Amino acid sequence: MINRIKINEELWIYFSDNKWLVGGINFPKNIHLTLHLGGNSGLIDLHLKNEKKTEYFTILTIDKNEIEEILSLIILNLLKILKDKIKTLTFREFKRDYKIFDYQILEKKISKSYLKDFLDFFGMTESKKTLGINFPQDNFRIPYNFNRLIKNHITQNKRRINVEELSSGTAIHKSGNNFTYFILNKQIFLCDSNSLEKIDQILIEAIGFELFENVMKRYSEGLEYLTENLNKNVNKNPIHIRIVKKEASA
């Protein structure tokens, strides 16, 4: 079973049941970033580690019992930010004006030859438990056969797909614009895919600029501490993200 991904020999990701590790050439030597999903401590933590010195620097912690509530708050913030970018349609309106890109049906249509073209294009290799991916550095274009397959698939399935069986995906308006859609309570919600290109900025706004800046500052302090020990008196106490509940007024 694959538990490690290497991308262009520049970035690697390792994952197990309770932690994710990220490292690569953009990290200082012997340094990697770990998201630990919690153990006996009951805390989820994000930390940096110097493998050579076996020393850690914890960036932030979250109580496992509060993670669902915290994520719910972030999602609510996202919806508030995106409310002007999302429009609601009936199934009839959606079927009339949009073509649906159904990845499951497309996957069934991909023959071995198409799949080989696709794997070759991304230079995918598998060695032991490591999946290697080498994206083309120049002339980044999807192979012609695969591109044609996608185009034919969209055209053929304009009317055939029962949208009521789907939950989310990509839709293409008859004008040619791409939209991300999801279905809730028998309604279609559409978001212009172009607005999602700035998803990093939207996420920062959803979690809060102050928190984001504090996390990035602590990340920089951790790198400095573990690589150069320029500041041995650095505060080792992590940022603890928690839910603060207001006391009911008497």
Image (cartoon, grey):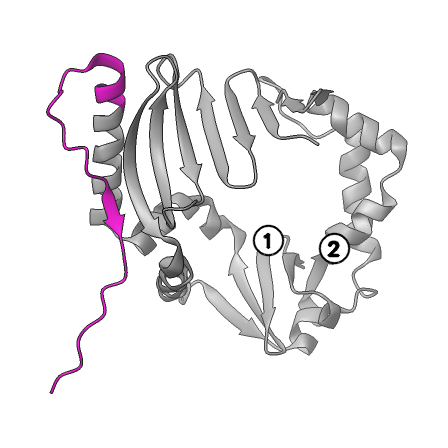
Which residue occupies the foreground of this view, 225 or 183? Answer: 225
The magenta segment: 223-250
Pick whichever of labels 1 and 2 is earlier in the sequence: 2
- Is disc 2 placed on a helix, strand or loop? loop
Residue in front for this viewpoint, 81 or 19: 19
- Find residue 177 and name its label: 1
> Looking at the picture, does residue 80 appear above or below residue 17?
below
Does 90 lie within the magenta span?
A: no
Can residue 112 be seen by looking at this rendering? yes
Q: Residue at x 64, y 23 (%)?
A: 133
Amino acid type of the residue tagged 2 in the rendering:
Asp
Q: Secondary structure at mark 1?
A: loop
**Picture quarter with the C terminus:** bottom left
Residue 74 visible somewhere in the drawing: no
Whole-percent x and y of residue 86?
48, 65
Residue 39, relative to residue 234: is it above or below?
below
- Image point 80% across, 38% down: which residue? 148
Residue at mark 1 to residue at mark 2: CA–CA distance: 16 Å
Dot 1 amino acid type:
Asn
Residue that appears at 39% across and 17% down: 51
Q: Which percent across, then down, holds residue 106?
A: 80, 48
Q: Quadrant of the N terminus?
A: top right
Give left or right: position of 135 versus 229.
right
- Considering the whole magenta stretch, tell me its main secondary structure: loop
Query: Which residue position is annotated with label 2?
Result: 102
> Residue 228's x, y, as percent?
22, 13
Residue extending farthest front: 40
Residue drawn at (70%, 30%), measured in percent from left and top?
142
